[in-house]
Amino acid sequence: QFCQSPHLAYRSISFSLQMLSQIHLAVFPSQDPLDRADFNAVEYINTLFPTEQSLANIDEIVSKIRLKIRRLDDNIRTVVRGQTNVGQDGRQVKEITRDIKQLDHAKRHLTTSITTLNHLHMLAGGVDSLEAMTRRRQYGEVANLLQGVVNVLEHFNKYMGIPQIRQLSERVKAAQNELGQQILADFEEAFPSQGTKRPGGPSNVLRDACLVANVLDPRIKQEIIKKFIKQHLSEYLVLFHENQDVAWLDKIDRRYAWIKRQLMDYEEKYGRMFPQEWCMTERIAVEFCHVTRTELAKIMRTRAKEIEVKLLLFAIQRTTNFEGLMAKRFSGCTLADGTMKKAELPPPSTNPFLEDETGTETDETVIEKGDIDRPKKPKAPDNPFHGIVSKCFEPHLYVYIESQDKNLGELIDRFVADFKAQGPPKPNVDEGGAVLPSCADLFVYYKKCMVQCSQLSTGEPMIALTTIFQKYLREYAWKILSGNLPKTTSSSGGLTITSLLKEKEGSEVAKFTVEELCLICSILSTAEYCLATTQQLEEKLKEKVDASLMERINLTGEMDTFSIVISNSIQLLVQDLDAACDPALTAMSKMQWQNVEHVGDQSPYVTSVILHIKQNVPIIRDNLASTRKYFTQFCIKFANSFIPKFINHLFKCKPISMVGAEQLLLDTHSLKMVLLDLPSIGSQVVRKAPASYTKIVVKGMTRAEMILKVVMAPHEPPVVFVDNYIKLLADCSTDTFQKILDMKGLKRSEQSSMLELFRQRLPAPPSGVENTSSMSLTAPTPEQESSRIRKLEKLIKKRL
């Protein structure tokens, strides 16, 4: 076949080998090449027939392969035939498994039946024993037995339909009820509601009875506790009845001393009678607190008119001390089980000044500006007994608030009197201005009040105290700060600032003395301190008060009041320096500028202005060193006031000759340099002036220089003059243009035509006119203008 069709034989052998390899590998894993997963028939045939001579054995090899295939077929048929019996074998196994499951169920049911019978036997015997022990009051044995019976009875909950089981359950309930009534009767006999307590310690019967009560209905336990505590505190209600002298607040210590003795007596006599988990000592103390709070509230309502602030604070202090002692002695576990509702207690107050309140420095420490950024100590654990008694004082805290109102009023009056007696503070240049010591005293007192009130209550009384704080912050601002600002009159001349504007040249100027300037700066610094501290006070009050009341605390109005004081102080300093310069400006406007024949050194009026600046500014700067931003505000406000006034007086200088205009330009430049140097004038440390201030001076004084440059420009031809004016000043006001013409000394007829031309030139000028300006023969060239400026600068340098 190979010789007749070699390709067909080749494919046949190849296919047979592949099939043989796959079948063999699946059934019998081996190392035979035919069993490999990546078997390659071509490679395998090449190994069988490496040469043409080896093809002579092809028939023999094909026969071997066919033999292998037949063997595999036989094995496959054997396996397939063997599977026909599997179903029958499986059914046999399933029957065996079912029998085993039935045996398992039988075993489980038998076990359950035996267990149930055992439980039933235990239950029946236990109920009989329980009834017998109950009659004999064998509470020690009953405590253990009852718990076991109850546990066993739980196993029969699903069998309650069986009459015998239901009967046993009813007998258990009856025994429990009988035990409860019997134990209550035993306690009533041992601790009768009326009469005295039985002497001696508790019997073992009652101790065991408490163990039984633990297993009974919780109401039995609660009834025992309630009756025992009521009987234990019955003496207290008699001794401290509201008609007794010891019941009033001045003897409140006796209440707390009494309960301490009672607790010690209880521990000694009855400490072992009740189980430890009942926390009877704490329960007695808590009930005492409830009763005390009720009794104190009743007696304070009756004798409200007799409550004085010292008495109230004394009672509150002793009470809070007792509450603190309770927190150290007890855990507060009984407060969560209904003995006392949590909602009755005010929320524990946070204490951001913990380090001050717990130490001895509270009274001497002021609320510092940086306290808000200071890391706070971890919050102390809350006192679960806080307010358990002291809450009764809260309705009467108005006495405390009224007292603080009175005390703060007296404090403000003392500040006023001290200021009048001692006079203004001495200049304190080294420390950058003195803050009035009274403001520190005020905030020390505020802090003490805030801390004290927050310990008494964090509710409405804190809001009332905040209102008092607001009242006296405003009074301090007006009576101590604004009320002591120097008046804008001279003690010798009695002139007002308004009248100073009308002073003639050479007249005396009413100026503040050095002491008055220092006082203004001191008041400004104090107002700035009060502003910052009031803001922090608001934040601290919000931390102290209940969260629901935080929005009602707002000291913005008081902070605005201190801002007004600061603004008024700065305005006084500006007015004083501004008024001091008025006579010099008046002298400038009255000079005969048309008669000036040559440009010399700076004019006397400039020297006068510089002198006043050098006198006032260093004093103000040194006294406001600690509040640098307000000194900058002073400089800005002075520049905004002086420069427009200087320009107004400049317009009054008329007529002006060319030389007179040059002298004025020199003076203007001198004033500009002085104003630019004003923030650091007279200082050994030269600082760069703030950019905002420099911008104002440059803009204002440049306008004054432009006015003079326009005046210096020739008015012929008129078109050129008008265009130069518009270009240099960019002022479309006819009034300003009229003033320029008056300064040049033009006649009315010339002014009329010039004004008409100005009105015509205000819109965008025609393109042909621009060349006229450049072709003017009389207009100063840029070189001439620069030469004139250089001459003026040389004169300025020479003067400096």
Image (cartoon, rainbow, N blue to C red):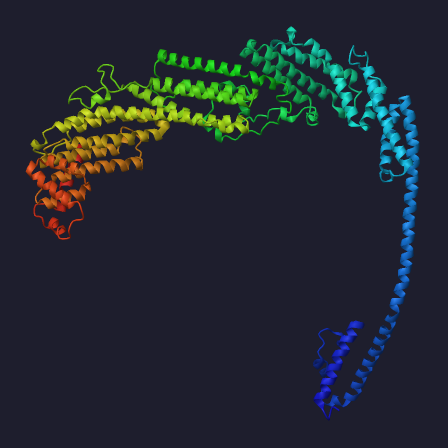
Work out whether residue 67 or residue 686 is closer to the camera in this orientation and state it: 67
Asked which quadrant contains residue 35, the reply is: bottom right
Residue at figure coordinates x 40%, y 21% from the top left: 474
Work out whether residue 5 or residue 666 is closer to the camera in this orientation and state it: 5
Of all residues, the one furthest to the bottom in this rendering is: 4
Tally of numbered discs:
0
Q: Position of residue 594 (x, y in %)?
A: 8, 32
Relative placement, left or right, of 218 versus 487 is right
Screen quadrant of the C terminus: top left
Q: Position of residue 484 (x, y in %)?
A: 34, 17
Asked which quadrant contains residue 677, the reply is: top left
Residue 142 vertical placement versus 491 (above, below): below
Relative placement, left or right, of 522 versus 606 is right
Residue at figure coordinates x 21%, y 38% from the top left: 702
Relative placement, left or right, of 387 versus 759 is right
Residue 78 visible within the image: yes
Work out whether residue 743 or residue 356 is closer to the camera in this orientation and state it: 743
Q: Position of residue 278 (x, y in %)?
A: 76, 24
Residue 751 vertical placement versus 452 (above, below): below
Residue 679 visible within the image: no
Screen quadrant of the N terminus: bottom right
Residue at figure coordinates x 56%, y 19% from the top left: 456
Q: Position of residue 627 (x, y in %)?
A: 36, 28
